[in-house]
Image (cartoon, rainbow, N blue to C red):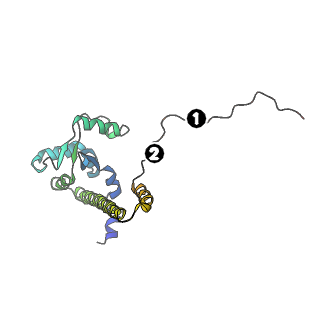
Amino acid sequence: MGKANAKSTSLIPTEQIEQLILVIRGQKVLLDSDLASLYGVETRVLIQTVKRNLDRFPEDFMFRLDEEEFEILRSQFVTSSSWGGRRYPPYAFTEQGVAMLSSVLRSPRAVAVNIEIMRAFVRLRRMLASHADLARKLDALERKYDAQFKVVFDAIRQLMTPPSAPKPELGFHTLRKPAKSSKKPART
């Protein structure tokens, strides 16, 4: 199967998976509810399966968020319906934990989804590595050339910095009609 054909038959686009990857405790993770959704199972079923195989999931593969992390996460996703009735902090699965899930969730969908998740993690690693490599090269060039290029290097660094997303305005907006003048037009 060719590379182009593999992309066209993927269940879930890699970009969609990348949006679900969070950094918690300095590790890239996927939350149990997001994984359950990707695998097409209920979150409780995923957790039950993991608990039956707990020896396969050491803390560097999976951990439960503490209350503070859970509150921070909940405050960031206030509009998400998946957080509505959840009473307990979610489990977070590292890349190794997600790989281990494929050995306990044996459905064809789980295997296919795991392949896409691994591709997403690899793609993120490559992007981070190329960004770090570019920064190293820029530092070397900066040291090599004198201050006359400092402005250029500063501009390049600004371009490398990802833009912060503009915050949407909240509230209700109305269109205001211009007030009618009480003066009558003068006749000529």
- The percent coordinates of residue 162 (x first, y second) are 40, 53
Q: Which residue is mark 2?
A: 166
Q: Residue at x 21, y 42 (%)?
A: 44
Q: Residue at x 45, y 45 (%)?
A: 166
In the displayed structure, 117 sits above or below 74; it is: below
Quadrant of res 90: top left
| Total numbered labels | 2
| Residue nearer the viewer, 139 or 165 | 139
- The percent coordinates of residue 115 (x first, y second) are 25, 60
In the displayed structure, 150 sits above or below 55; it is: below
| Residue nearer the viewer, 150 or 40 | 150
Amino acid at dot 1: Thr
For label 2, count other residues whose C-alpha is less than 10 Å away and answer few (under 14), some (14-19) or many (20+): few
| Residue nearer the viewer, 62 or 9 | 62
| Residue nearer the viewer, 110 or 160 | 160
In the displayed structure, 41 sits above or below 109; it is: above
Which element is circle 2 on?
A: loop
Q: Which residue is mark 1?
A: 174
- The percent coordinates of residue 108 (x first, y second) are 22, 58
Which element is circle 1 on?
A: loop
Q: CA distance from mark 2 to mark 1?
A: 21 Å
Which callout, 2 or 1, points at the residue further toward the start of the chain?
Answer: 2
Q: Residue at x 24, y 48 (%)?
A: 26
For label 1, count other residues whose C-alpha is less than 10 Å away and answer few (under 14), some (14-19) or many (20+): few
Q: Residue at x 29, y 34 (%)?
A: 85
Amino acid at dot 2: Pro
